[in-house]
Image (tube, rainbow, N blue to C red):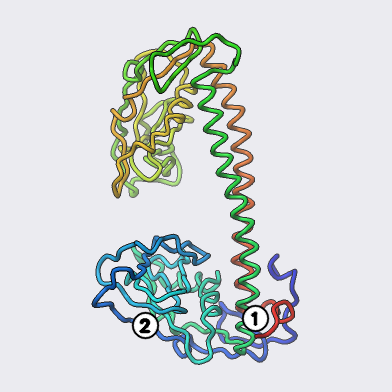
Amino acid sequence: MSGAGKRWKPYPTYKDSGAEWLGEVPEGWAVKRLKFGVDDINQKCLEEAPLTPFVALEHIEPWTGKLMVDESSQSDGQPSCYQSDDVLFCKLRPYLAKVHLAKVNGICTSELLVLRAQHGIFPKYLHRFLLSRDTIDCITASTYGAKMPRANWEFIGNLLLPIPPLPEQRAIAAFLDQQCAQIDSLIEKKQRMLDLLDEKRRAVITQAVTRGLDPTVPMKNSGVEWLGMVPEGWEIFSLRRLFCVKSGDMTTSTDLFDEGFQVFGGNGFRGYFDKWNTNKGVIIIGRYGALCGNIKISPDRIWATEHAFRVVPFMVFNVHFMAFFLEHLNLNRLSTRAAQPGLNSEMVRNHLIALPPLPEQQAIADYLDAQCAAMDSQRENLEKSIELLREYRASLITHAVTGKIDVRDVAPLQ
């Protein structure tokens, strides 16, 4: 039994559920097809009240079901109606595990199934069952092979649903509410630590690339209002005097291989290709995509796609120092605010830089390499910890709603 099951005891006796993916369930639990205890509410809203909350797929947080939207969101197309205590299940790409328990009446995209618990099914229990990893995996398996995987009610409705007595369903739901709240609180604290680490990284980089490493060095006025004072001996340049940027070459996902030269696009690493167009040690800037503006240095000969810029120097400078300076600029904030955020060459080159002598550029780059490596290690540890907590949360839900653990003594029957 996994970590989620070791802390709590199992039920005294079990019986076969009749479904291989579900396994055994406790004696005393009923097992029946979902469609006999849950209704698929396929009701379109012909008229939309102006203040009616609208839920789209992107508003639901994966694996938690939390809403990430305010009540001002507007619908697109012909939405479906839902009521408080309905469960909204994402049909499109069900592996994303977007399942929300409605707290108010509202409307939602037609890509969400509206499921209403009936006949002795507690809505919170139904929500947790549909969010369990085993259930999500089973539904996802039914969509394999499709270009746009989409679940359907015919399959979901025929899933076997383990049904404890109603007081026990409420106890399981209360137990999971309490446990998941504690886990989510830990995740939020670690996420805040990640945010603080990002702020520290930005501050350390900005200080080093604009002020240098020696706080006692004489300073001079840069003549640039936003740049302010800079160390003596640093020269002011426009980036357009130092380099140009050139786009990579066209590549599609069908061109990629499992091995070969690394491919970098707008959001970073994409896969492998059998050709290369960029030498080792070249600055790569993401040009399009959600992460556009991200900065990489080619680790070897690579293929840069049309969604990335390559920095081509006109003058000699330390590549690592320049990469840190470009990271300091936070180019992503300049990207066009469209469905596909993007940068053009002027957004990159239309900046001024206070450039230290080459030996000082090297010293700053070495310092930042060491500082950022330490912070990256901290980030990796925090991300692993968050991932373990999420895995534990998913495992706990699965163990509780399938009866692998007995929580009746932990959460009294209601």
| Identity, as a three-letter code, of the amino acid under mark 1 | Ala
Give coordinates of residue 215: x percent, y percent. Answer: 60, 16
The answer to which of 309 and 322 lies nearer the viewer is 322
The answer to whether residue 274 is visible is no
Q: Quadrant of residue 279?
A: top left
Q: Residue at x 41, y 67 (%)?
A: 144
Q: Quadrant of residue 48?
A: bottom left
Q: Residues within 10 Å of mark 2 (few under 14, many from 20)?
A: some
Q: Is residue 249 above or below residue 73?
A: above
Q: Quadrant of the N terminus?
A: bottom right
Q: Quadrant of the C terminus?
A: bottom right
Give coordinates of residue 84: x percent, y percent. Answer: 44, 78
In this picture, residue 194 sits left or right of residue 9: left
Give the number of the disc on residue 41: 2
Q: Residue at x 34, y 31 (%)?
A: 309
Give the number of the disc on residue 62: none
Q: Secondary structure at mark 2?
A: loop
Q: Residues within 10 Å of mark 1 (few under 14, many from 20)?
A: many
Ranked by sequence position, the earlier of labels 2 and 1 is 2
The residue pinned by badge 1 equals: 171
Q: Is residue 236 above or below residue 251?
A: above
Give coordinates of residue 177: x percent, y percent. Answer: 61, 71
Q: Secondary structure at mark 1?
A: helix
In this picture, residue 203 sits left or right of residue 306: right
The answer to which of 19 and 83 lies nearer the viewer is 83
Q: Quadrant of residue 277?
A: top left
| Identity, as a three-letter code, of the amino acid under mark 2 | Ile
Q: Is residue 245 above or below residue 172?
A: above
Q: Residue at x 47, y 74 (%)?
A: 103
Give coordinates of residue 191: x percent, y percent. Answer: 58, 50
